[in-house]
Amino acid sequence: MTFKDLKLSEPLLRALQSVGYTTPTPIQQQSITPILEGSDIFGCAQTGTGKTGAFLLPLLEQLQHNADKRNVKALILAPTRELAIQISDNFKEYAKHLSVTQATIFGGVSQFHQERELRKGVSVIIATPGRLLDLMEQGIVRLDKIEHFVLDEADRMLDMGFINDIKKVIAKLPKQRQTLFFSATASAPIMKLANSLLNNPVHVSVTPISSAATLVDQSIYYVRKENKKLLLNHVLKSNDVEHALVFTRTKKGADRVAKELNKNGITCEAIHGNKSQGARERALQGFKTRKIRVLVATDIASRGIDVDKLSHVINYEIPEQAETYVHRIGRTGRAGASGTALSFCAKEEVKYMKDISKLIKQNITVVSSHPFVN
């Protein structure tokens, strides 16, 4: 199947061709046609599956015939600034031959430039909940003409405590609208939220959460907690680790790891919610262009990080939720490329690894030939 088979118009096909996309991913194959037909969607897909294109392409197809700068016609709600910016970047790529306009709004920066874009008039708003509500309260944003509403990364929205903000936004939307709901998991709270929003939705699901990326080579290092920083330095200096995304549980932990690596001559930046927007964007750009070899991130900040040919993901700390492990290692081994995931497991984290093994049903190689074996 090609994008042409999905009945996308020539300007969109031309834009896709210019960025080298010819074949839709499974989530795109399943989603684009029902969205074009006006159906609500419940999509269960983890990161790296082409989910953003699955909702952006059909939205642009519909809006190019119905663009109206005087009224916002579509709202895309994302949990983090990084993800909102990533969606915006994709929008610009896909819409470059269309007259559909957008504004991307998020907190952590002055609202001046965002407000200016909104006052010019746009067809689409891509937003994080907090800044959107702030601008709504100021009377700068109205949602009463919205025809398409996308809730992306709904599970992360709930994890971050945005449920009340989401409800406030939804209360301002027209009852008659198309709603596209995407989540990496389908837990009971997620299904409850989805059922309250969706009208007879089409369910699409790809790459179940239990199936970790098959092209990712997974290894585990058992190590004392206090020796993890020594092990990380050893791995980065002795192994063929070209480009690594390192995960910690906390913001302070990310800062500590980054400081230690830089002290040891390894170019590194940390990215998390306490960093300014400018610092986060500079770190991410430096990582994408490979000026920075290692990026240390918390799980929430990592949503929206999409880096081509990332060689390694390192779980400096094992996540408490097994599903989070799958999201983490899915950052490598994308688009047919191979990848490597290394996990540093202290005694108190063994229970989390047991849950992960139970979920993914795959063997994780134990590396016992390192200087800091527990």
Image (spheres, grey):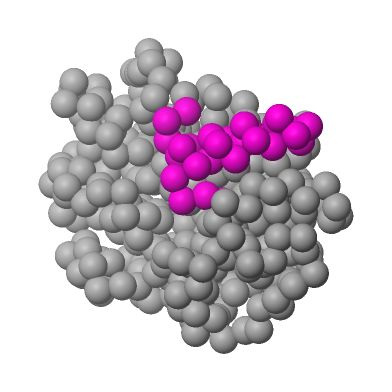
Residues in magenta? 247-275
Q: Is residue 243 magenta?
A: no
Q: Is residue 266 left or right of residue 82?
A: right
> Residue 248 location in percent, x, y?
52, 49
Q: Quarter of the image for the N terminus: give it.
A: bottom right
Q: What is the x, y in percent for residue 337?
A: 78, 64
In this view, 14 is above or below 138: below
- Residue 204 lies left or right of residue 326; in this view the side is left
Is 294 on the left-hand or right-hand side of 347?
right
Q: Residue at x 44, y 45 (%)?
A: 250
Res 82 visible: no
Q: Is residue 128 above or below residue 137?
A: below
Picture quadrant of residue 220:
bottom right
Tell me which residue sits at (62%, 32%) in the image.
259
Q: Looking at the image, which residue is at 31% across and 72% down?
A: 187
Q: Quadrant of the C terminus?
A: bottom right
Q: Image height check: is 36 above or below 289?
A: below
Q: In the depicted view, which residue is nearer to us: 28 or 315?
A: 315
